[in-house]
Image: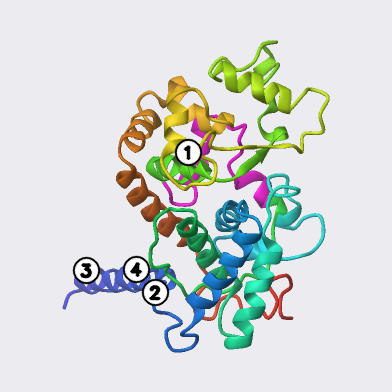
Amino acid sequence: MNRSCKLACYYFFLINMFLLHFTVRSQLTTNFYNSSCPNLSKIVRKEVVKALMNEFRMGASLLRLHFHDCFVNGCDGSILLDGGADTEKFAFPNVNSVRGFDVIDTIKTSVESACSGVVSCADIVAIAARDSILLSGGPSWNVPLGRRDGTVSNGSLANVVLPSPFDPLSTIVSKFTNVGLNLTDVVSLSGAHTIGRARCALFSNRLFNFSGTGSPDSTLETTMLSDLQNLCPQTGDGNTTAVLDRNSSDAFDNHYYKNLLNGKGLLSSDQILFSSDEANSTAKPLVQSYNDDSTLFFGDFVKSMIKMGNINPKIGSDGEIRKSCRVINS
């Protein structure tokens, strides 16, 4: 074998080892706990049912918790960690906004009683998000599992990488692209706003002096505008909440997209998917398709949730299985 052939074979070997390593590291499996914690799904479902019976809005909160966890350091439960001002809980997109920590604590306690030291907090968050969607009338799927918990919570990173309701569409798409997601994922995952509520502080910029114009956002439907101006006066504290999906706030369905077609998206980041010039050849056709076909929306939403849940998971010897979701073991 000549020298050039040996080099070619060597590099081919290295490339294949790299690809194999990447595949193994990124692989989650739906049967990960079949032997070590066979009743895991039932345990989580039981606690999520209790949480939604106590406050139905909690379903949307648990879903959002998974989303905000995965975008920062990957899906590693880092958003659950207590700590100082630079933890993810205190990041601007999360503080006084992200909820459901007590529910995750309750689920973790029940899981630990059945399978001590086996199930990660990151996996509990992923299952609870799926169950919240299902129990709200949405689709179900087998959640890929095997994540381990991270040991670092990075609030500064959360401030930078999490999509904001004030971002233009190009910035939102870029933030999704940075974690391996695409435009379809942007539009389908935005459909999660078919359930839940948002604080006035997150959309009041549209109500009175939008972008310094001295007038409300012209894309906001007039009756909805009037209702929101009464709900969120300029002198308000910003913490009053409004439903994200007007006239269908408790059902996980495709009504969110109908609202966008009619100028009734609550957040600026919702309505720009249909009404911005940038959306005409990008997001708008998808919004129209999901409005017309709920089955298409559900199918794409499930695919996007699985993709999002596979953002940089810690597996193998990375991370740990936390005893408490709020603190690292050491």
Foreground tag (1 vs 2): 2
Q: Position of residue 58 (x, y in %)?
A: 62, 55
The residue at the point 79 percent across, 63 percent down is 83
Q: Which residue is mark 4?
A: 19
State the SS at label 2: loop
Q: Which residue is mark 1?
A: 173
Foreground tag (3 vs 1): 1
In terms of image quadrants, where is residue 3?
bottom left
Q: Which residue is mark 3?
A: 4
Q: Earlier in the sequence, mark 2 or mark 3?
A: 3
Give whichever of 125, 225 is nearer the camera. Answer: 225
State the SS at label 1: helix
Q: Earlier in the sequence, mark 1 or mark 2?
A: 2
For disc 3, the neighbor class at 10 Å (few under 14, some 14 to 19, many from 20) is few
Q: Which residue is mark 2?
A: 29
Q: Is residue 157 above or below residue 241?
A: below
The residue at the point 36 percent across, 54 percent down is 303
Q: Is residue 191 above or below residue 126?
A: above
The residue at the point 38 percent across, 68 percent down is 142
Q: Earlier in the sequence, mark 3 or mark 1?
A: 3
The residue at the point 70 percent across, 76 percent down is 324
For disc 4, the neighbor class at 10 Å (few under 14, some 14 to 19, many from 20) is few
State the SS at label 4: helix
Q: Position of residue 203 (x, y in %)?
A: 66, 30
Q: CA distance from mark 3 to mark 4?
A: 23 Å
For disc 1, the neighbor class at 10 Å (few under 14, some 14 to 19, many from 20) is many
Q: Residue furthest front?
A: 53
The kind of residue tagged 2 is Thr
The kind of residue tagged 1 is Val
